[in-house]
Image (cartoon, grey):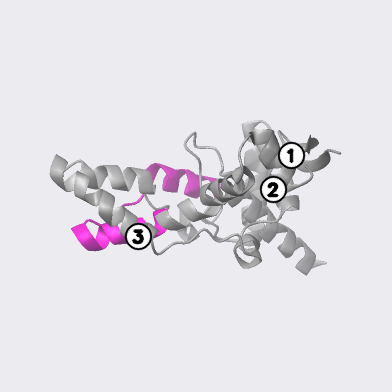
């Protein structure tokens, strides 16, 4: 019997039917261990890689002496949205951009040597699906709310973000590659905003 799994997209609450057991999943995938592999891949994407990227940026700074820069455009946008621009912290340069900038002045040999160092850093970061790690992220209800906000026209979204920022104070809202608010970062902002509203009642 299929099992329903809840999720959301474009602000809609959805349920999809899927395997009810690990064995059913593996059978459908056509190989033993598929369920575990897919679960680990998902955890890597959502938690392990961001953790590794943060550690890698620090290691790059230590190795090369090149400091991670500021994403000035993102910082300017964040300050333009805020009623207290002086309190908005600088938005760090994206790790991808920092990594590319450091490698741009390296020889092919030095670039190739980075692979082993990157793995050294990866060896210090485990795939951790524990509740403590998941609690660090926003809960499902906040992600649903963030998805709902992200379906709004840009002007309406900005009004909501500004209102939340005014209540919360300084908050470094991360942006994605399309300069839209990052879903998880937005969900965290909404969580802080709701906490402020509850505290005021």
Q: Is residue 148 left or right of residue 122?
A: right
SS type, badge 2: helix
Badge count: 3
**Who comes first in sequence, dot 2 or dot 3?**
3
Q: Is residue 78 left or right of residue 193?
A: left
Q: Is residue 141 above or below residue 157?
A: below
Name the residue carrying label 2.
143
Magenta stretch holds residue 150: no
**Camera-side mark, 2 or 3:** 3
**Camera-side mark, 1 or 3:** 3
Q: Nearer the viewer, residue 2 or 166?
A: 2
Badge 1 density bin: few <14, some 14–19, many ≥20, Cα 10 Å: some
Name the residue carrying label 3.
121
Q: Where is residue 115? Give x, y as percent.
A: 27, 49
SS type, badge 1: strand
CA–CA distance between discs 1 and 2? Answer: 9 Å
SS type, badge 3: helix
At a point 56% along the width and 44% down the height, the residue shown is 182
Q: Nearer the viewer, residue 82 or 51?
A: 51
Q: Nearer the viewer, residue 184 or 55?
A: 55
> Can you tell which mark lies on residue 8?
1
CA–CA distance between discs 2 and 3? Answer: 30 Å
The answer to whether one can see residue 28 in this image is yes
- Callout 2–callout 3 Cβ contact below 8 Å: no
Badge 2 density bin: few <14, some 14–19, many ≥20, Cα 10 Å: many
The magenta region covers 53-82
- Callout 1–callout 2 Cβ contact below 8 Å: yes
At a point 28% along the width and 42% down the height, the residue shown is 100
């Amino acid at each position: 019997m299929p099992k329903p799994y809840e999720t959301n997209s474009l602000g809609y609450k959805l349920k999809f039917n899927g395997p009810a057991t690990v064995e059913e999943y593996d059978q459908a995938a056509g190989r033993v261990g598929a369920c575990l592999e897919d679960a680990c891949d998902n955890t890597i994407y959502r938690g392990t890689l961001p953790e590794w990227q943060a550690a890698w940026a620090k290691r790059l700074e230590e190795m090369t002496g090149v400091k991670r820069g500021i994403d000035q455009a993102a910082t300017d946008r964040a300050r333009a949205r805020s009623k207290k621009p002086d309190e908005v912290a600088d938005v760090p340069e994206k790790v991808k951009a920092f990594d590319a900038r450091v490698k741009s002045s390296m020889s092919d040999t030095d670039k190739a040597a980075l692979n082993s160092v990157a793995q050294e850093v990866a060896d210090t970061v485990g795939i951790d699906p524990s509740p403590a790690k998941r609690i660090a992220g926003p809960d499902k209800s906040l992600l649903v709310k963030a998805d709902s906000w992200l379906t709004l026209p840009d002007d309406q979204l900005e009004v909501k973000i500004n209102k939340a920022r005014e209540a919360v104070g300084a908050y470094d809202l991360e942006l994605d590659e399309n300069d839209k608010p990052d879903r998880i970062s937005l969900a965290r902002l909404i969580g802080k905003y709701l906490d402020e509203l509850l505290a005021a009642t």
